[in-house]
Image (cartoon, helix red, strand yellow):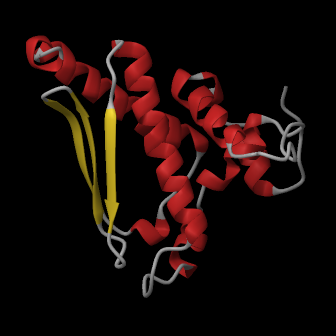
Amino acid sequence: MMTALSDPRFTRAVSDDGSLATPFMKCLARLVRAHDSYGLWKDKCDAELLANFTVTEEQRRAIPVIGDPEPDVLLRLDLFYAAVGVVIEERSGLLISRTLEISDEGIGRVLFTTRRLVVLSKTLRDVHRFGFNTLGKCAKTGTKLVKDAIKSIETYPDVARA
């Protein structure tokens, strides 16, 4: 259920290319909803909840990279990569461990492992400006990360299950 909203971020998200229906975006919406301990977001549609993952070029330029990354940016980053890990688990049937390390300068690494296999390793830069131009880009990026991890698991199944 999506509603038309007056905020351009939501309008762009709602009129997106159907990316909210992907398993990755559904998982991301579930994780965002899990942070709503008081039920304030229960009436919001997924597009409205996930609109914070979109950052326009103008917004990106306005974000200073000096100082620690903002807590809301770190939460978005954590939720995004948590969703990647959950979808990898759902698709592979394996337990996935995620390690996310970010420095004060906004540089870091995210690492996904299962048993003895590193299924995905990604260097993070410019974390201060983490976000996507559209929800479609968010879905595409998350889905690609999941596919890459699944490909690693399928390439080395003995190591993944050792």
Q: Position of residue 9 (x, y in %)?
A: 74, 54
Q: Position of residue 65 (x, y in %)?
A: 43, 82
- Tell me the residue at 67%/45% (across/down): 50
Q: Position of residue 33 (x, y in %)?
A: 71, 39
Q: Is residue 133 left or right of residue 112?
A: right
- Tell me the residue at 62%/27% (across/down): 26
**Would residue 132 be seen by someone viewing this image from the given angle?**
no
Q: Relative to 90, does residue 138 appear above or below in the rendering?
A: below
Q: Is residue 94 left or right of residue 141?
A: left
- Tell me the residue at 36%/12% (across/down): 93
**Would residue 139 be seen by someone viewing this image from the given angle?**
yes
Residue that protrudes farthest toward the bottom in the picture? 66
Total residue callouts: 0
- Res 48 → quadrant: top right
Quadrant of the rendering where the N terminus is positioned: top right
Q: Relative to 117, does residue 134 appear above or below in the rendering?
A: below
Quadrant of the rendering where the C terminus is positioned: top left
Q: Position of residue 158 (x, y in %)?
A: 9, 12
Q: Is residue 3 left or right of residue 18?
A: right
- Tell me the residue at 53%/71% (across/down): 60
